[in-house]
Amino acid sequence: MSTQRLEGVEAGKGNRVKLVLGENPFHPAGGGQPGDSGWVEAPGLRCRILDCRMEEGAPVLLGEVLEGTPVPGAEVEARVDEERHHLLARMHSGEHALSRALEKNVPGLRVFKVNVDTKESLITLRWEGELTWEVLFAAEAEANGVIRADLPVTTRVFSREEARVDPDLKANWDRLEGSGEAPESLRVVSLGDYDKVACCGSHVERTGQIGGVLITGFKGTAPQWEVRYTVHRDELLEAWSRPLRRLVRQVGSPPEELEKVYGRLQEERAEARRLLDRLRPFLALPFREEPRGEASFLRLVLPGLPLDLITGPCKEKIQEDPKRLVLALLPDEGERSPFLVCRGAGLTGDLKGWLKGHPELAARGGGSPDWISGVTQERDPEKWAEALKEVL
């Protein structure tokens, strides 16, 4: 906490406000990292600071006034949320280690954008190859080795000329000079001798303070990929290990064999689908049809049948007669049973909206105005038929 003078106040919509302090202790947003948050307070005044940004070369606090009115020239206590600040510093420093490991281990891979947050952060990269878990695991292991080495994290300001000729320094010169406003000096952050990159974010003092990095997922196609990671490594690994240990016990297979077991199950499922496709033309499903004025209502109740098996026949029924409404209930022994509702083109009504209006069916699902499916706790077809009257 520090005592500061309010140099500027600009009111926004509602209780939003922009504040300028004489000496700003809040780290501004930059380098893919959000700005610090915290509080600005004085007797009779409380402002929650939501962000800090650079505007016209000066740091500006974006906040909301909870009590009182901020007045230029007033003395206030500025309090940064140090816990959040330190977490962002860990996340950002962890990103440096992980990004360098990716670029070092994979020729041609280049990180060009990061989004740092407190829970999970994102690295966006370009690579013409196929990104795999094996590639990511190798980078993760190297980055955690850098963290365990407890290297010093230092910050130094380089002149533009120094930065240009340093072969070890990474800077996004396309972004810096693309606008024609490249700075005369660059703030450079180094993780020992392992990484050196131009960055305006906040960082830890030693890599050991990062704690560890864990890649939580990735997506994309060549040449652009997104990699998600976190520094909440220990907590997440412990949380994820619990369902894994339960699954290992249920399957009766060691953890390293689970992928093979899953692969075999996928093959068996594909073969079962092919068998069902061959059998489908010979199935006579017991649809029960009830006239409802100019329309008709069809219901099908078959315990334990897979939803895939009845999807085609239901579609055929509404194609044969566009004024049909079809309900299929497939009750099983679990807490929730599969269901399907579809209507022909000759009927109107939004089935998706209808489902939301009937919480008594205890159903979860989705789809479109003319076709919905999901699972339900209500296995009584009469209650479904009563609720569907409004569609007809």
Image (cartoon, grey):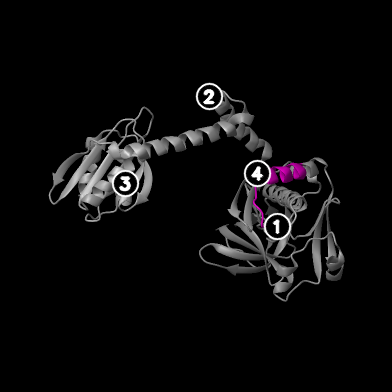
Disc 3 residue type? Leu
Asked if the stretch drawn in magenta spans residue 33, the answer is no
Disc number for residue 133: 4
Local secondary structure at mark 1:
strand
Q: Is residue 295 visible?
A: yes
Task: Point out which mark residue 111 bears.
Answer: 1
Residue ID for mark 2: 250
What residue type is disc 1 on? Answer: Val
Where is residue 126, by image quadrant? bottom right
Query: Which one is in front in this view, the residue at disc 1 or the one at disc 3?
Result: 1
* 41 vs 384, nearest the viewer: 384
User: Is there CB contact under 8 Å for labels 1 and 2?
Assistant: no
Q: Which of disc 3 and disc 4 is earlier in sequence? A: 4
Report which residue position mark 3 lands on.
355
Q: Give the percent coordinates (x, y) of residue 91.
A: 70, 49
Would residue 288 appear left or right of 333 to someone viewing this image? left
Q: Are dots 4 and 3 in contact, CB under 8 Å?
A: no
Q: Is residue 106 left or right of residue 62?
A: right
Circle 4 — which element? helix
